[in-house]
Image: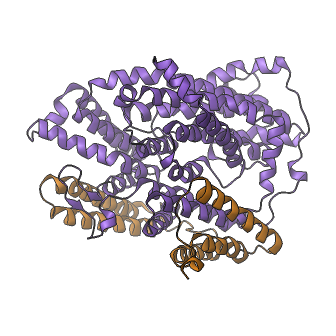
Chain colours: A orange, B purple
Amino acid sequence: MERRQDIVLGVVFAALGLFAAVRAAAYAGASGTYPMVLGLALSGFGILVAGKAVLRGKPEPRPLTLHAGRVAITVAIGAVYLALVPILGFYTASALVVLALPLALGFRQPVFLALTTAVFIAIVWVVFSIVLEKPLPAEFWQTF
Amino acid sequence: MDIVTQVLSGVFAVGPVAAMIGASILGVFIGALPGLNPVMAIALLLPLTYSMEPLVALGMVAGIYNGSMYGGAIPAILLRIPGTPAAIATTFDGYPMAQRGEASRALKIACWSSALGGTASAIALMTIGPILARATLAFGPAEYFWIAMFGMASIGVLVGTDAIKGLMAATLGLLLGTVGLDQLSGTPRFTFDQVWLLSGLDLIVILVGLYALPPVIALAEAADLKGLSAAQLKLEPAKVPWSEVRSFVPTWIRSSLIGIGVGILPGAGGNIAAFLSYNAAKSASDDPDSFGKGNPAGVAAAECGNNADNAASMIPALTLGIPGNVIAALVLGALLIHGLQPGPQLFHQNPGLVGGFMVQMLLTSLLILAVGGAAATKVFAQVQRLPGVLLVPTILVLMAVGVYVINGRVVDLWIMFAAGLAGYVFEKVNVPLAPIVLGLILGPMAEQNVRRALLISRGDVTELVTRPISAVIALATLGLIVYPVASAIMRRRRAA
């Protein structure tokens, strides 16, 4: 058990539980009782986790990432991708992320990457737009 | 139409048959690719099943589940990299066999053992499931409330390394399950004036985030740019003599029984079944020292054990609504998508569907023999030539499209992303994810039943524990929570 990480974890859960309990207390009748009890229980478990870490934790932090840079790149590009989906359209944003993310992670075979992107996007288009006929965010050029 | 005809006509229709075959092949591919796992694959698949017939959707789940459990053995034997956590024990003897040039033989043994374990497990599901469902017909709201609590407590305590964190995760799941309109009074809870929150948090959106994003980030961290070379994946043909097959029979019987037992227990998974089966085979062997050095019986035990866990984990899920493992929780999600409430009533209201799913678990176990044969395994092994970094964005896109098509809302993409990041951090700080999912599934059931029980008893709380069956389940739940605390205190006293 890592002391600092578990103290933070316990405090976050305790605060979340307390917030939920206070919020639930405002709900009328039985609607509020159940989430209030759960909120208090969550708080209690949070305090237990933090308390246990204070009493018996060791100052040996667990590594939260194996490679912080690659995690940051993936999370950042993933977030940008989700932000671009409603702006550029699903297929355009998806093609960009399939091209950009491997490049950002160090993949240097552009022809292979371009082919993979084309084949993959074509498969997704056939499955979701042609076979399943699922409506997806429209492509930006379709709005002109 | 009698039930058998109804089940068979449903299962052997074109759609379910195609779903089972396609998903079994896909399952072996997924299992063969280290970094991908059946939980992630089924989580990604679930959003697509909304518009499908239930037996097509469940056939796909069954195929991916059974197929991937065998697929995990391919990299475990060839590369000592378990394709799934359940294949760890397969590496012990599978890889030494491959080093001796017996990879094909080990893969054949793994294939037969997986098929047999899965078949035995499906037979257990088909026989024990209906009996248990009949027994639980006597249950009222109080019993259902305690069953939900028992499931939560068992998953919370048994999964992971820290019981308190498990219980904390379970409580978080239960709390997340209260978001949205209260189903009994119509009061909006934790909606923060957001209309899209009125219907609550979508289970599938959370599931996809929790179970698909952490492996994607892990693949990015590994940054595999090349994949494996063809030479690393070369397989020589091999024959397994009939006398050797016969020598595996006791191992298969023992491992099947262990896997079924582990599967029924909520919280224990295929990896535990494989380890227990492996150890049992080693203990029963005349030459235990040969285990870990390429003994084929080690491969047979591990693979039979981990597949025997599959269908058995559905027994508590289908009869009581308590999943034995995360995949069983996903199956519950698939049933809920189609408006089917897991539990004893499911057997009486939808016998064709439940029976059909049980038959599909059996058929997809047998399908391993067809799709996991020597030639097919050679093809599946080739998927490991794909550079891992290409999988990172492709899975991300599949997650996005799968989640978006559920409700057609961009906000769901962000919820999925947030759930995934939370899941990634939770895994790092040893907070198990399964109790959160179970809380989301069982939370509404628990709340509705406890409030219904209190309405029936006119607010008398003692009614929850004075009925004999509910008292027994309540005591078992309490015991589950108190036991780890009490044993820790005892251990400390003894040490002092």
Count the marks: how many? 0
Look at the picture and state if B269 lies above or below B433.
above
Residue A76, located in which quarter of the rendered image? bottom right
In the picture provided, is B423 more to the left or to the right than B465?
right
What's the residue at 83%, 43% (across, down)?
B378
Q: Please tell me which residue lies in front, B240 or B56.
A: B56
Observer-nearest residue: B113 or B261?
Answer: B113
Using the image, determine if residue B178 lies above or below residue B492.
below
Q: What residue is shown at x 67% (from left), y 34% (from top)?
A: B302
The single residue placed furthest to the left in the displayed view is B458
Asked if residue B280 shows in the view, the reply is no
> Nearest the camera: B418 or B279?
B418
Image x and y of residue B35, in percent: 66, 55
Residue B458 placement (x, y as % from top left): 8, 39
When asked about the image quadrant of residue B366, the answer is top right
User: Residue B200, percent across and down?
Assistant: 33, 58
Can residue B304 be seen from the camera position used here?
yes
Is residue A25 placed above or below A77 in the rendered structure? above
* Position above or below: A136 against B68: below
The answer to which of B31 and B299 lies nearer the viewer is B31
Q: Is residue B220 left or right of residue B205?
A: right
Quarter holding the N terminus of chain B?
Answer: top left
Query: In the image, B52: left or right of A117?
Result: left
Residue B465 is left or right of residue B79, and the answer is left
Res A17 quadrant in image: bottom left
| Residue A50 in picture, x, y percent from top left | 36, 64
Q: Residue furthest bottom?
A: A144
